[in-house]
Image (cartoon, rainbow, N blue to C red):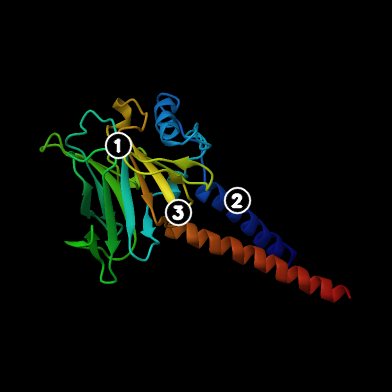
Amino acid sequence: MKKNKRFLLFVGIFSMCLISAKVGLSAPMTFGDGGASLQGIIDDITVGGPSTVDVTTDALSDTNDSYWSITGSGGSISTIIIELAGYAGTNQFGIYDQTDSSNKVVLFEGSDSSGDQKAIGIKDTGEVVINFASTGVFFAGNSFGYFLEDTHNPNNIKTWYSDTSLNSDGYDHMVSYQGNDTDTIQMPGFAPGLWTDNEYILAFEDLHLAYSDGDYDDFVVIVESVQPVPEPGTVALLGLGLVGLVGAGIRKKRRNKALI
């Protein structure tokens, strides 16, 4: 019995530690330029800057920003902060169905620029609407990823997904930051407002990481009324951890009663 109890307690604590490391709100991020460019971009939109967000330490963990869902009843707004990519004129940004990465909807084309906005909605039928108009595309549900697509060479289109496992080079091409209800930011052409915790800045690297500068400033956008979707494996791990801790707690209570 003691061995079982110790095992359950170990499983519980170990699983919770894994969860903390796996889905922590922040994780260290390594940049080719030490984060200088992206930090400068976020500082520039912060009223009275610099920002309280540190791009090297406050990024969401890679496993916690792969997929997202809309939390607003009417949809989510995406606003371009800046695009500095060499292929800015041909890059496309959008969302893709979690169950089928080839099922995509483009939000911004190469002709779009800083301050441009798009409203996204997913109906109960799975129909995706952009600016309240049907795209004719249907997702399996309210769970999607973000992508940046380099289309400058039609014969060799490169698509970089928020889900690192889908990227052809095996690297993470999107880094994300959650608002902390502290900084006031100002989007190009819009009045200042609080960067709330339901708003996230997404920053992309648009080239193969082995051949890029790794500064993640090629396409930077802010999205609101969304939240990360925990990966199924993480949810299962959380359940395992809770079972272990609860099981250990029950056995402790029984032992205490036996001593009374």
Graded by Cα atoms within 10 Å as few (under 14), some (14 to 19) or many (20 or more), the crowding at tag 3 reads some
Q: Position of residue 69 (x, y in %)?
A: 37, 59
Q: Where on the picture, by quarter, is residue 40?
A: top left
> Where is 10 relative to 90, above or below?
below
Query: Which residue lies under the disc numbered 1?
Result: 169
What is the three-letter code of the residue carrying label 3? Answer: Asn
Q: Position of residue 187 (x, y in %)?
A: 36, 41
- Please tell me which residue is depicted at 31% across the width and 40% down the height of the picture: 189
Graded by Cα atoms within 10 Å as few (under 14), some (14 to 19) or many (20 or more), the crowding at tag 2 reads few
The answer to whether the residue labelled 3 contacts the one labelled 1, judged by CB atoms less than 8 Å apart, is no
- Please tell me which residue is depicted at 49% across the width and 51% down the height of the picture: 197
Asked whether 167 or 27 is in front, the reply is 27
Relative placement, left or right, of 85 versus 155 is right
- Please tell me which residue is depicted at 32% across the width and 31% down the height of the picture: 209
Query: Which residue lies under the disc numbered 3?
Result: 198
Q: Position of residue 5 (x, y in %)?
A: 70, 64
What is the three-letter code of the residue carrying label 2? Answer: Cys
> Where is 1 relative to 219, above or below?
below
Label 3 secondary element? loop
Q: CA distance from mark 3 to mark 2?
A: 26 Å
Label 1 secondary element? loop
Query: Which residue lies under the disc numbered 2?
Result: 17
What is the three-letter code of the residue carrying label 1? Answer: Asp
Which numbered disc flags the more N-terminal residue, 3 or 2? 2
> Where is 116 relative to 232, above or below?
above
- Please tell me which residue is depicted at 35% across the width and 37% down the height of the picture: 171
